[in-house]
Image (cartoon, rainbow, N blue to C red):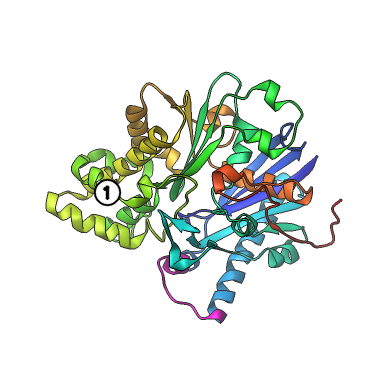
Amino acid sequence: MVRVIGSISGTSVDGIDVALVDAIGSQTDLQVEFVGGKTFPYPADLRSQILSVCAGASLSVAELAELDDAIAREFATAALTIQTEYGNAELIGSHGQTIYHRPAQFGEKKISGAEMGYSVQLGRGALIAQLTGITTVSNFRSADIAAGGQGAPLVSIVDACLLAQADRSLCIQNLGGIGNFTYLPRREQEKWGDNSEIATLGEGIVGCDTGPANSLLDLAVQHFSGGTKTCDVDGAWAAQGNPCQALVEEWLKQEFFHQKPPKSTGRELFGTDYFHRCAIEAQAYNLSPADLLATLTELTAASIVRSYRTFLPQMPDRVLLCGGGSHNLYLKRRLQDLLHPVEVLTTSEAGLSVDFKEAIAFAVLAYWRVRGIPGNLPQVTGARAPVLLGEINSCWHSWA
């Protein structure tokens, strides 16, 4: 058994989610015990800088290096702090902070003629390893991208190992800044067995990004509150409004929603510019701030449901929500209404922390990396083959 720290700061840039787990087994026999987790907010000025860069602000190479190291120090401090509460770890899996994500393809067009995607996660693993004294796996997306994949979503195979059920099909729906899902067919024991081959394990699994989740909602709250609020707690503000269905249907014509998987996206598409266009278009309908929040929430819910109905072999028996958006009661209610009679719960109700599932996943991916086990799922990311994910930044530990 290996004690591993997993850490990630998602598209919402809310802070660093850190999970400490005990892991044993390979893939089909993987067992993970969640020891504890904590979210560490970024310093306000650092968060502001990250959001500015994600929105397209220019940096010199020197400034980029300074930002990379500043984020790494925050991740290292978080890893050291959580060990004071839950005991020492032997390995860190650090996703870092995504500041730019360009998939290899968008729709039917190559981006700038590129044959390969590009994704940048700051918070370099080498510095985290040196500051913590713990071997650190980082830069998880590059190997999948090099194999022709999107580099996202990467957690589908972990979802399969930890959440698949024998008696029902599931959709694991993450509601971070960007939404993504993993569809898990019923876990057939005769196919599961003791075979750890990723091709067998991934049979029938579908996954992709669905579009915006919290990104547009957070931008709207910041805009309408004059920067005094960063999110709509419990969806209470949106619940006071009425969604404009005409706008939702117009926004759903956006090309991304019709693109077949594999596909992924980020703030490059559903970010500040997109929100401002939405706000301008909403003026023609005389929407109040609450109405616009309700309409953006409806876009999130409707895009998720449309993805299921369009790209899945069948609707799931149950949906399990995770990520920050799972606490948005209004969004959850709209998903329940639109998905009826499909049951909508959270991963916590299935035994996996709703707040730290993504961090747990990167702990598992790091654990697999040092054991030479591939961590991507080609039919989800579009990669040509299963590959080892992540770069190993060693300290004094030696791994067999």
Residue 323: tell me if it is visible: no
Q: Is residue 372 left or right of residue 61?
A: right
Q: Residue at position x 62%, y 70% from top? A: 69
Residue 143: tell me if it is visible: yes
Number of labels in the image equals 1
Based on the picture, tell me whether residue 65 belongs to the magenta stretch.
no
Residue nearer the viewer, 95 or 191: 191
Secondary structure state at the residue bearing disc 1: helix
Graded by Cα atoms within 10 Å as few (under 14), some (14 to 19) or many (20 or more), the crowding at tag 1 reads some
Q: Is residue 72 above or below residue 300?
A: below
Q: Is residue 2 left or right of residue 273?
A: right
Residues shaded magenta: 48-61
Quadrant of residue 61 in the image? Answer: bottom right
Q: Position of residue 246 (x, y in %)?
A: 19, 43
Q: Is residue 10 left or right of residue 87?
A: left
Q: Is residue 303 above or below residue 347?
A: below
Q: Position of residue 133 (x, y in %)?
A: 78, 61
Q: Position of residue 52 (x, y in %)?
A: 42, 68
Residue at which label 1 appears: 251
Q: Position of residue 276 (x, y in %)?
A: 27, 60
Q: Residue at position x 62%, y 54% from top? A: 144
> Given the image, on which type of amino acid does mark 1 rest?
Trp
Quadrant of residue 204 in the image? Answer: top right
Q: Is residue 243 above or below residue 98?
A: above
Residue nearer the viewer, 367 or 16: 367
Based on the picture, tell me whether residue 51 belongs to the magenta stretch.
yes
Q: Is residue 267 above or below residue 365?
A: below
The residue most toward the top is 167
